[in-house]
Image (cartoon, rainbow, N blue to C red):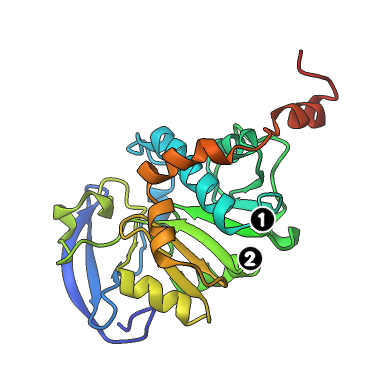
Amino acid sequence: MSCSICNSPTGKFASAIVLGKHKVDYFKCCQCGFVCTEAPYWLEEAYSTAITGSDIGLLRRNSRLVTIAHAVISVFFNTRGRYLDFAGGYGLFVRMMRDSGFDFKWYDRYCTNLFAGGFAADFDNAGNFDLVTAFEVFEHLVDPVDGLEELLKHSKNILITTDLLPKPAPKPEEWWYYGLEHGQHVSFYTRKSLQFLAENKGLNFYTNGATVHLITEKKLPAALFFLLARHKTASLIAPFLSKKSLLEDDFRTITGGELS
C-alpha cells in the first residue's frame, strides 16, 4: 500500500479485532506517519447507527467546540458570514452557534437533524461559506484527500477536530481513539500528515497541538490560533466577543410568531 495522503510507502503496523469479530490490519506511512486500516469492508455494519452508542462525550464536546469556534471565528473571520457544519450530527452544534449569533447551517447525509430544523443546507447547491466546520469527521474518511476536496468546494477554510496520534504511535489496543468497539474510525493523523494534506492544496495549516486544527487560505499567527483553539483560553475571551442571538429571529422564521 502507498499512503493515501503523501503517496509514500506504508508498512503493516498492527492488527486488531474490530466490532468484536473482524481481524483488521493497520498500516503506517514511513514518511508522514499517517495510520489507516485496510480497505474497511465492515463499514455497513459499523454504521448501523450513525452515531455510536459509545460516544457519550457528545454533549460535552459540542459545548466546548461552541466556545472554541466562537473565539476562532470572532478573531479570524467575518462574524456576519455564512457558516456550515458538515456531518453535523443531531444539529446540536448548529443550534448552539445560532443561539450565539452565528449564521450556521447544518448538513449530514446520514444523521437525523433533531436540533437545527429549518437550517439544513442543500450541500450540492449551497454555494460558498466563510468557514466549514467538520468535527470528528476526518478519522471516518477512507480517502482523506477526496474528503478534503469535497469540503473545499464550499470553503477554503476548514475547521476540523481529530485527535493527533501520540508519539510514538500506539497500537490499536493501546489508544481509545481507534474505536475498535464501533469500527467507524479508519484514518489516524499526525501533525505532519495533516500539514501535508493542507499544503498539497496550497493552503495553510494551524493546530492547537492536540485535537483542533484549521486548514485555511489565510495566513494567521500560529501562536494565537494555538491559544484560541484551546478551551481554557477560548472560555476566557468568549464572553467579551458576544453577539446578538439568532434565537428570536429563528423562532419567527420557523413559526411566524413571536417569543413572549
Q: Amino acid at mark 1?
A: Asn
Q: Which residue is mark 2?
A: 155
Is 243 located above or below residue 255 in the figure? below
Residue drawn 26% across the image and 55% down it: 178
Q: Amino acid at mark 2?
A: Ser
Residue 225's spot in the image, x, y percent? 44, 59
Q: For mark 1, does the 10 Å Cα neighbourhood hold few (<14), some (14 to 19), or many (20 or more) residues? A: few
Residue 63's spot in the image, x, y percent? 45, 36
Depth check: give the residue in front, 255 or 72: 72
Residue at the extreme bottom of the image, as rendered: 8
Residue 98 vs residue 239: left or right? right
Distance Cα–Cα, label 1 vs label 2: 13 Å
Is 90 located above or below residue 134 in the figure? above
Residue drawn 47% across the image and 75% down it: 198
Residue drawn 70% across the image and 53% down it: 81
Residue at the extreme front of the image, as rendered: 240
Residue at the extreme top of the image, as rendered: 260
SS assignment at label 2: loop
Q: Which residue is mark 1?
A: 78
Res. 142 image quadrant = bottom left
> Of marks 1 and 2, which one's residue comes earlier in the chain?
1
SS assignment at label 1: loop
Camera sees residue 8: yes
Is 51 located above or below residue 28 in the figure? above
Is 234 located above or below residue 17 in the figure? above
**Total marks placed:** 2
